[in-house]
Amino acid sequence: MKMKTTLSLVAAAVALFSYGAFAQDKTRAEVKEETKKAEKSGQIQPGEASPTPVAKPKSTKARPEVKAQTKADVKAGAIASGEEGKPGPKPKSTRARPDVKAETKAANKSGEIPMGEAGPKK
């Protein structure tokens, strides 16, 4: 029994370590040569695999100046936000808060406002 276990472990180890030998078909020089040929023939763009880093643009304004300008633009409505774009004026209610609260309380008590997943009472 020990012999079978030992042989299976040895076979598994040989299979595991021999896989790396078959993984590499080409040398690094061959891969580089293929890449140069592909660039010359137009199959790939030069630098496509490893793009060169681009320097970040420098700002010409100071941070407080930019923040003040942004705040002014938001207040003026020049900066779109959300899905609707330019924010419009906020609607003003024509009714008093206590009246709205009393109406909501009465609707809730009568069962007009659904609660949970059950829906309105019948």
Image: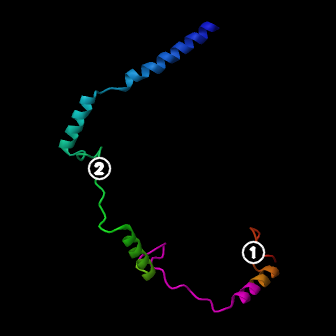
Residue 91 pos. (x, y %): 56, 87
Q: Residues within 10 Å of mark 2 (few under 14, many from 20)?
A: few
Q: Is residue 30 magenta?
A: no
* Magenta stretch bounds: 79-103
Please tell me which residue is depicted at 52% across the width and 13% down the height of the picture. Answer: 10
Name the image quarter holding residue 102: bottom right
Q: What separation in Å lies between label 1 and label 2 (alpha carbons)? A: 58 Å
Q: Residue at x 38, y 75 (%)?
A: 69
Q: Residue furthest bottom?
A: 94
The spot of residue 27 in percent (x, y) is 28, 27
Quarter of the figure that contains the N terminus: top right
Task: Identify whether 74 is placed above or below 52.
Answer: below
User: Quadrant of the image for the C terminus?
Assistant: bottom right
State which quadrant residue 108 falls in. Answer: bottom right
Could you tell whether 88 is left or right of 24 in the image? right
Q: What secondary structure is found at the residue carrying circle 1? A: loop
Question: Looking at the picture, which amino acid does disc 1 mark?
Answer: Pro
Q: Is residue 116 above or below residue 42?
A: below
Give the residue type at disc 2.
Pro
Q: How many marks?
A: 2
Disc sitting over residue 53 in the figure: 2
User: Could you say where residue 72 lies in the image, as x and y percent from the top left?
Assistant: 41, 79
Mark 2 secondary-structure assignment: loop
**In the drawing, does residue 31 fall left or right of residue 21?**
left
User: Disc 1 marks which residue?
Assistant: 114
Q: In this rendered view, identify the residue nearer to me: 109 or 114.
A: 109
**Closer to the camera, 62 or 80?**
62
